[in-house]
Amino acid sequence: MVEKRSIIETLLSIREASQILGVSEVTLRQWTDEGKIKAFITPGGHRRYSRTELRKLLSSQTKMHGIKDLVSELEGSVDVHREISRKAIEHTSWYGQLTPESQEQLGQLGRGILNLIIRYINDPSRREATIELTRGVGHDLGKMLAELGLPLTTSVEAFILHRDPIINAATQLMKKREGFTGRVVEAIPMVAHIMDEALVSLVAAHQQNRKEINGDSKGGTR
């Protein structure tokens, strides 16, 4: 968007502005024409840019890239979760009693929670719906673990083992990309919140299922 400016202030040439943004003059002209950044026209017809407008554009780009990087980190954590299962869970007595179908179902539920976390961060317009879906997956996971005979404490411990890498993905990104910390810092409590919702639903479903099983057992002995 090109505008005329009557108030005199120190403005930057297109060459200086493009150097600050780290893009070519051609790209900056295109962004101006698309309305991504404002430019002011001198009496001689040259484009000039204010530092305020440059900071706005840099800030918006930083926020966008920060979230994309976090999503990429989360998507890349699938292998980490597999390794956790292999090292910490596969050697437990209860895991050895699982059928291949049960193992696959647990894996699907875990991947479902991860996908919903990514959606929750990446799509603000659907966060309420995403929370509800996450509670549903947490409920299904708690019910399944209870039906498999896992104690509640073991179920929670297994969940937390997979929770840590997801939180760590955000904190590690902060260490690697200092320029992106603002938006990523905002995402950390969001990640924790949606995982807490899944865990609360898991615990509630597990407790309810165990009550039902114990009630049926007592009823059968009468």
Image: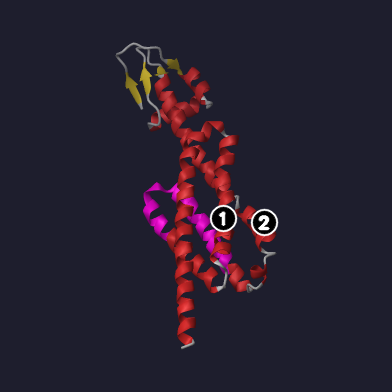
Span highlighted in magenta in the image: 105-133
Q: Is residue 125 above or below residue 97?
A: above
Q: Is residue 70 above or below residue 11?
A: below
Confirm whether residue 30 shows in the render: no
Residue 163 colored in magenta in the image: no
Q: Residue furthest left?
A: 6
Give amino acid for label 1. Answer: Ile
User: Where residue 107 sits: x, y (%)?
Assistant: 58, 64
Q: How many marks can you see? A: 2
Picture residue at 50% right of the left edge, 18% below the top: 15
User: Where residue 98 sits: x, y (%)?
Assistant: 63, 72
Image marks 1 and 2: residues in contact by CB distance under 8 Å = no
Q: Is residue 212 above or below residue 164?
A: below
Residue indicated by mark 2: 83
Q: Earlier in the sequence, mark 1 or mark 2?
A: 2
Residue indicated by mark 1: 160
Colour mapping used in the image: secondary structure
User: Where residue 52 sits: x, y (%)?
Assistant: 40, 22
The label on residue 72 is none
